[in-house]
Image (cartoon, helix red, strand yellow):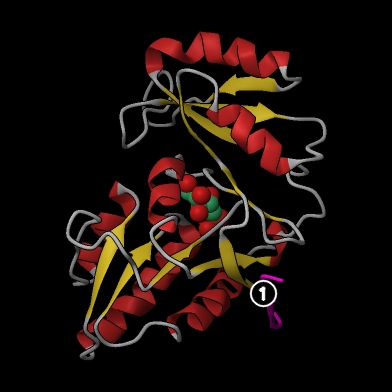
Amino acid sequence: MANTESKRRAALAAIKHVEDNMVIGVGTGSTVSCFIGILGEKVRGGLKVLAVPTSYQSAILLSEQSVPLTSLMDHPSLDIVVDGADEVDPDLNLIKGGGAALTQEKIVASATEHLIIIVDSSKLVQRLGETGAVPVEVIPMAWKLVKTKLEEKGARVVLREGTGKAGPVVTDNANFVLDAYFAKISDPGSLESELKAIPGVVENGLFIGMAELVYVGSDKDLKILRKK
Ligand code: 5RP
């Protein structure tokens, strides 16, 4: 069962990878928020880092924690990236985008050789798609067309609705998110490419072969999964 202690355990493991003068990418979500809190303590204690955020949420939290921000324009290559995930399979393939930040998260993840994922044990699955949808960020004028194309591929598709706002979620990039529920994803790599090829799709939440290391926190211990 996910709890704050599990997330903190994973975040504490990831912080050990952060060294003086690194430029790091920082993901989005509740587990990463925990990581940002710990990072802030280190920075206020004298650690020198620059951080590239993946969302307004992370940028605001990093700024509140006095962690200096930078961008991929100034630092297109990152020492490490720390992010969360919605699902992690045994090959360390991921589904991300529960916080609708998948596009910037995938761009930032692609800027490093060292993507470190922090999750609690509820995120481990045998097969991607087991517990949830594949989020797909779409250009607003194309959403209905893309929904139909995803349905033709066998998915049940839901336009993500917001809370605290009537109507669809609008991403940090001013797009919509379709949540595509596939009954069975047998080849996530091929599906990733297929989704990318649909006109109107900006990005999808399948992160294939990108994670180097996954820290899995539980209320009792920490598990480390490494890329084979
Ligand atoms: C946001 C993400 C998050 O990393 C993912 O949803 C996990 O979030 P949390 O740590 O809150 O469970 O992909 O787009």
Which corner quadrant of the image does residue 153 belong to? top right
Which corner quadrant of the image does residue 59 belong to? bottom left
Vertical relation: 226 (above or below) 59: below
Q: Is residue 1 left or right of residue 75?
A: right
Vertical relation: 3 (above or below) 13: above
Per the image, is 216 magenta?
Answer: no
**Which secondary structure lies at badge 1?**
strand
Q: Is mark 1 within 8 Å of ligand 1?
A: no
Question: Which region of the structure is painted magenta?
Answer: 219-228
Vertical relation: 144 (above or below) 183: above
Where residue 43 sits: x, y (%)? Answer: 24, 82
Circle 1 residue: 226
Pick the quarter of the image with the N terminus.
bottom right
- The residue sitting at 58% across, 63% down in the picture is 211
Where residue 94 sits: x, y (%)? Answer: 63, 52
- The residue sitting at 74% across, 46% down in the picture is 128
- The residue sitting at 74% across, 44% down in the picture is 131
Closer to the camera in the image, 187 or 156: 187
Where residue 72 sits: x, y (%)? Answer: 25, 56
Per the image, is 222 magenta?
Answer: yes
Q: Residue furthest bottom?
A: 45
Which corner quadrant of the image does residue 227 belong to? bottom right
Q: Residues within 10 Å of mark 1 (few under 14, many from 20)?
A: few
Q: Is residue 133 left or right of residue 143?
A: right
Where residue 215 sits: x, y (%)? Answer: 61, 74
